[in-house]
Image (tube, rainbow, N blue to C red):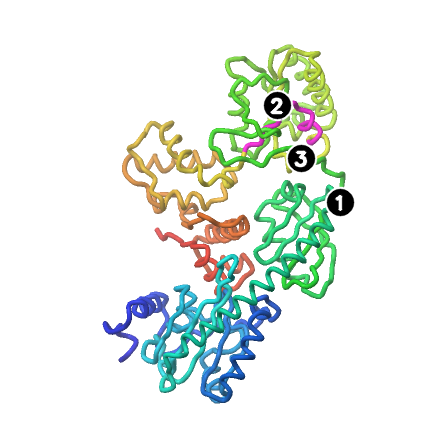
Amino acid sequence: MRTSDIAPSLRPEIALSWRRCRMSGLQPEAPDLRIEPGEVDPRSRLVAAAQPVLEQLAEQLGDADYCVILADRESRLVDVPLGARTLRSRLEALGVVAGGVFMEETTGTNSIATVYELRHGLAVHGEEHYLEPFKRFSCYGHPIRHPATRRLEGVLDITCLAENDSPLLGPFLARAVSDIEERLLLSARRAEQHMLAAFQAAAAGRNRPVLVLGEGVVLANPAAVELLEPIDHLRLRELAADLGRHHRHEERAIELSSGRHLHVRLKAIAATADGTLFEFTDPGEPRPLIGGAARPSAAPARAWVSTGAVVSTGAPVASVYIGGEPGTGRTTTARSLAGETGFVTLDASEAAVQGEAAWLAALEQACASGMLLVEDAHVLPGACAVRLRRLIERALRGQAARRILLTGAPFAELAGDAAALAAGCASRIELPALRDRPHDLPGLVRAMLDDLGVGDRVRFTPAALAALAAHPWPGNLRELRAVIGGVVAHRSAGDVTPRDLPENYQVSPRRGRMTPLERAEHDAIAAALREYDGNKLRAAQRLGISRTTLYSRMRALQITVSNS
């Protein structure tokens, strides 16, 4: 039987694997070898947990014609297989070496690549292999999952010549995997204890941001939570990988996703495979921490103040700072607070155009009004910010009847006079960025469709909403409104699918129950794919990872690219 014809006698899961191989363009005559020895981490937690078990298996198998092979969570072989020398030599020519990438698009149907795809144990016998050179072998594979997180850590495989196949190999392998998983759990508990102890020692009695990152572990004090966005964790993990695991430490300059420049001190945590401690300091003027400011809520029509209470329309407060990224609805929120009362608006950016003296004169004139709104207050020059802060202080003391509303950048981005200005307000509202509230997208889209007068005539499918949720939305609600308006201009009725969206918005993932780190990783990959119109090779180069690693992470994060 030739692989070019999918035999109807194949088991369903094998037949589906063959179909995936054919669709990937893999030819059945030989593997598309990819060997990346530089990507192998010989000190990983998986290798440390598996090594004693593999040594025990080697003793049990002796000189029998079997090979035991370990692959990591990227389906990359992490070690030269254990087993008979003659069998190992035959397998090496097929890419069974350290760093060999075993995915269905590179090595076809086998008990590493297909187990990685299916996430459950599988035997592949002789002719069931997609690649002709592999048909002389039989193999059994079993996924290795972390007992606590249930994440896939790797795959364990045992391979033999087809004539030496035995149904006992499956249970034999499953017991070995159980031993590895038990050791993974024990090592994780020890590592987490060390990471927690290091974090508590560094954070005790200090206000500076402190963070610990490890395998599946994120520990942060309130200052670090306020400072860092999920996308920053990716950069920090890259720095940790460069640091090594020799109990070394170093200091680096880093630019955060917010644009802030800081110094960070990294220290590898002893007795852990990957734990790293980060301590941040500001090279310039210390940024005042906004005490009590709550993290943004995902609520679509609400903003949260420093006390955690919701500000209602017309709330009688003397001064309010409304922070958020451009396009998050800062002005709309200010107008809702003003209610029916009229107000005078000043644009802080005009101070740079008109000059400080002219702007201050306009401020004095506006003070005669019952309510004052200052837009983009965070860009005010020093003298103007000081004068405005004094007006706010007078309003707080009841010496002025006016109410003052300010809009500006998010609290975490404020420093110097801008931070003092926001801190001096009686109440502060932080508007969440659209990328932080993906669950609100259906309601927001529906509201915008209603505003455009199309009502129920247009419906965004779940796939289209998922594609929108993948976008980082630097323009927030303003950008979303423009996209919805563009779609409605071309489709006035019916279902909107990803293909109806602008091209740069057609990356379609499922962000469901991702951790913050996974969402950050997902967003970075989605952005790179959008930037290069779905070209995976260029996206991988942009991200600084191999194409194989990109494929792996896309599969794990369920990112697909819709083609027009």
Pinpoint residue 468: horizontal percent, then vertical percent: 42, 43
Most foreground residue, 33 or 559: 559
Decide which of tag 1 and tag 2 comes sooner along the chain: 1
Q: Which mark is residue 414?
A: 3
Amino acid of disc 1: Pro
Q: Is residue 206 above or below residue 322?
A: below
Residue at 42 percent across and 50 percent down: it is 509
Q: How many marks?
A: 3
Q: CA distance from mark 1 to mark 2?
A: 30 Å
Decide which of tag 2 and tag 3 comes sooner along the chain: 2
Name which quarter of the figure residue 51 lies in. bottom right
The kind of secondary structure element at disc 2 is strand
Q: Is residue 425 above or below residue 248?
A: above
The kind of secondary structure element at disc 1 is loop
The N terminus - image quarter: bottom left
Q: Residue furthest left?
A: 8
For label 2, the residue is: 320
The local crowd at label 3, few if under 14, some if 14 to 19, many if 20 or more residues have their Cα within 10 Å, is many
For label 1, the residue is: 283
